[in-house]
Amino acid sequence: MANTFKIGDLEVLVFSDGTAKVPGTMYFAGTTKEQWDQHKRWQDHAGNVEFQFSSFLVRSSGAQVLIDTGLGNIKWGPMSGGALLGEMAAAGVKPEDIDTVFVTHLHFDHAGACAQDGQPVFPNATYRWSSDENAYWASGGNPNDPTRSIFSHREMIETIAPKFEAADDGAAIASGINVIATPGHTPGHAGVVLSSGTERAFILGDAISCPVQLEEPEWSGMGDLDPKLARRTQEAVAKEIEDSGALLATAHFPGLTFGRVLRGEGRRYWAPV
Ligand SMILES: [Zn+2]
């Protein structure tokens, strides 16, 4: 079941498309069991991190915006999903009700359900992501991407093209929903900032993939195309969130929830609300 939050006048439903368990020492290459012993709250007893595949439905003045679509029918290693549409139906939301689909970046676990069988899954929606992200994948993307054989970015981009409208840093997706550029994980990765009244919340896709990275800001996870830029982006956005007291959610943090970025013993950490 979706979790529901209010950010001022905005309503946010957080849906799960599925979960995957990956050993922490594998996802963060080069990290050791001894290092992870300091961060056991983010692991299960076997040393696995559970990654949630979250999608966020934001309702703003009658508009319904879906942020990230999960994996759809795509399966890869421990990663599978496909629960989103059923979870939406359980909350009374049909695919045709979605006005805008915003995708943080075009990895298959976020863009996997944009299109299916050559058709847009959300037939009435305008699809939006950054122009840098679109250009990168439309021109072939990462030649070493191990998921190329299971997800054709070009095919998806072609299917969606008539409904695509680029959304770059600062763009308004709907009232109180604005894009924030967060490059590094992919060249055109972007999140959104929700603002209403005095309340603010960030939804950051894979700019930070696991809460442990707030405690260990040098750790870069699997899938970061430019790890150095990703960490610089993370530092800037984490500082802004900490300083402003805003809420933070990302695609893969556990619990389908927002949290606050707090500080203890000289380190930031994420405290779910
Ligand atoms: Zn992801």
Image (spheres, rainbow, N blue to C red):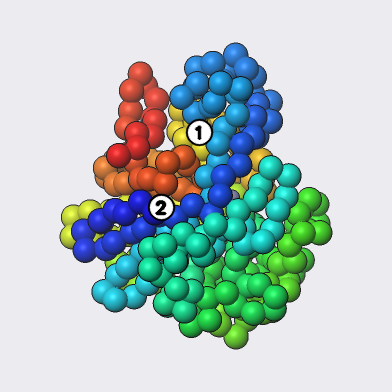
Kind of element beneath mark 1: helix
What's the amino acid at mark 2?
A: Met
First in sequence: mark 1 or mark 2? 2
Rendering quarter of residue 51: top right
Kindly tell me whether residue 74 is visible in this rendering.
yes
Q: Position of residue 166 (x, y in %)?
A: 53, 74
Q: Position of residue 44 (x, y in %)?
A: 54, 26
Q: Nearer the viewer, residue 62 or 200?
A: 62
| Crowd rating for badge 1 (residues with CA inside 10 Å; few <14, some 14–19, many 20+) | some
Q: Residue at x 23, y 54 (%)?
A: 199
What's the amino acid at mark 1?
A: Gln
Q: Residue at x 55, y 36 (%)?
A: 50
For the C terminus, the quadrant is top left
Q: Is residue 223 left or right of residue 57?
A: right
| Crowd rating for badge 2 (residues with CA inside 10 Å; few <14, some 14–19, many 20+) | few
Q: Is residue 220 above or below residue 203?
A: above
- Of discs 1 and 2, which sits in the foreground? 2
Separation of disc 1 and disc 2 at Cα?
27 Å
Q: Which mark is residue 14?
A: none
Q: Which mark is residue 1?
A: 2
Q: Is residue 196 left or right of residue 183?
A: left
Q: Which residue is mark 1?
A: 213
Kindly tell me whether residue 227 is visible in this rendering.
no
Q: Position of residue 186 (x, y in %)?
A: 62, 54
Q: Nearer the viewer, residue 121 or 142?
A: 121
Kind of element beneath mark 2: loop
Q: Position of residue 36 (x, y in %)?
A: 56, 20
Q: Residue at x 32, y 46 (%)?
A: 247
Asked if ligand 1 lies within 8 A of label 1, the reply is: no
Q: Residue at x 21, y 63 (%)?
A: 9
Q: Are marks 1 and 2 in contact (CB under 8 Å)?
A: no
